[in-house]
Image (spheres, rainbow, N blue to C red):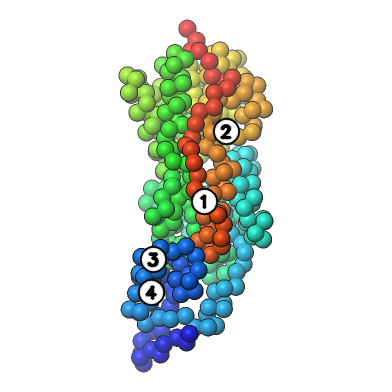
Amino acid sequence: MPTQPMESGRARPTIKAVAAVAGVSTAAVSQAFNNKGRLSEATRRRILDAAMDLGWSPSAPAAALRSARTRTLALVVRRPTDVLGADPHFSELITGIEGELAPRGYGLLLHLVTDVDEESTLYERLAAEGRVDGAVLTDARTDDPRPALLTRLGLPAVMLGAPDPDAAVPGVGLGHQGAGVGEVVDHLLGLGHRRIAYVAGPAELQHTRLRRRRFEDGLRAAGHRPFAVLHTDFSEGAAIAATEALLAAADPPTAIVYANDSMAVCGIGTAQRSGLRVPADVSVVGYDNLPIGRWLHPRLTTVDQQVQQVGAAAARLLLARCGEDAGDARLDGRPRLVARDSTGPAPH
């Protein structure tokens, strides 16, 4: 279908302009004109109306160019290299993603960045160079600029986090994100703990705020207050420093909850080097349910958030947004407590 002629002096409309007016990705515009994908009729109609208002229609060469795929998806992680290498969470996540991509002939391009500006610049370069078909976003934050940026770039994306299929970049994760932390609080209170501390992640992350709120609300509902809440960057050094500070208190906590399993492992080691027994002197809880938790002594009490399954679901949803028939991306269940040996009755 040839592009309609434009009046002299007027800029030629683009597929990105259509996508911006319709509030969708450029991939969705292509799907609407090619009758592919799983667009709702309302979305398809909105795209066609936007194209008509702008006077845009796809040319045959442009359609051919858009149909050429890199068959590569990007995973951009905002972590220091040493933190990423030491955290098995991302190994589990990548295993889940790759399990869906490899059978379909897709590859995963991993990038590490230090801040949001570097990440935004990276997406702009990847889109301009046509190096990837889509992106998996990690660590949703307050006032996150990435969904709007990727929509403007016409790059399909999904966000790891609370499910939100109606957002510009839909979230993929288990529902009821605070439920696991609520079970942790109930578990520790049931064991007689009253001085309970929380070693959290960066304060600007959405899941940090959600879990902290659920931790504080659970204690408050039982008539208690957190012993302390300390924020970290997820690094080994920060986890050790936070644990040492808590255990150095005049009347230290009898239980410490960590935002991930890697920090909980550091916490157990720090407590044991201080001459304390886990869980006889201090109970420790992690979050992720990674295999390392089963290999420890004592085995780690943690929250299972099905990291591999979330990665696989994110890959399926992103493949669907790229026009592939990738199957159901929905996840059942919610985060749940896995009680093991690192928690026990509060010491008298």
Residue 82 in view, yes or no? no
In the rendered image, residue 242, in percent from the top left (x then y), is placed at 50, 28
Q: Which residue is mark 4?
A: 48
Instruction: Report crowding for label 3: few under 14, some 14 to 19, many 20 or more residues within 10 A (C-alpha).
Output: few
Separation of residues labelled 2 and 1 (CA atoms): 21 Å
Instruction: Report crowding for label 2: few under 14, some 14 to 19, many 20 or more residues within 10 A (C-alpha).
Output: many
In the rendered image, residue 323, in percent from the top left (x then y), is placed at 53, 65
Kind of residue at disc 3: Glu
Q: Which residue is mark 1?
A: 329
Q: Which residue is mark 2?
A: 289
Kind of residue at disc 1: Ala
Separation of residues labelled 3 and 1 (CA atoms): 20 Å
Disc 1 secondary structure class: loop
Residue 106 in view, yes or no? yes
Instruction: Name the residue at 39% across, 55% down.
Output: 167
In the rendered image, residue 34, in percent from the top left (x then y), is placed at 49, 74
Q: Please tell me the numbered disc located at residue 41.
A: 3
Instruction: Name the residue at 52% across, 52% down.
Output: 328
In the rendered image, residue 282, in percent from the top left (x then y), is placed at 53, 17
Q: Please tell me the numbered disc located at residue 338.
A: none
Is 320 or 280 nearer to us in this picture? 320
Separation of residues labelled 3 and 4 (CA atoms): 10 Å
Is 256 or 42 nearer to us in this picture? 42
> Who comes first in sequence, dot 2 or dot 3?
3
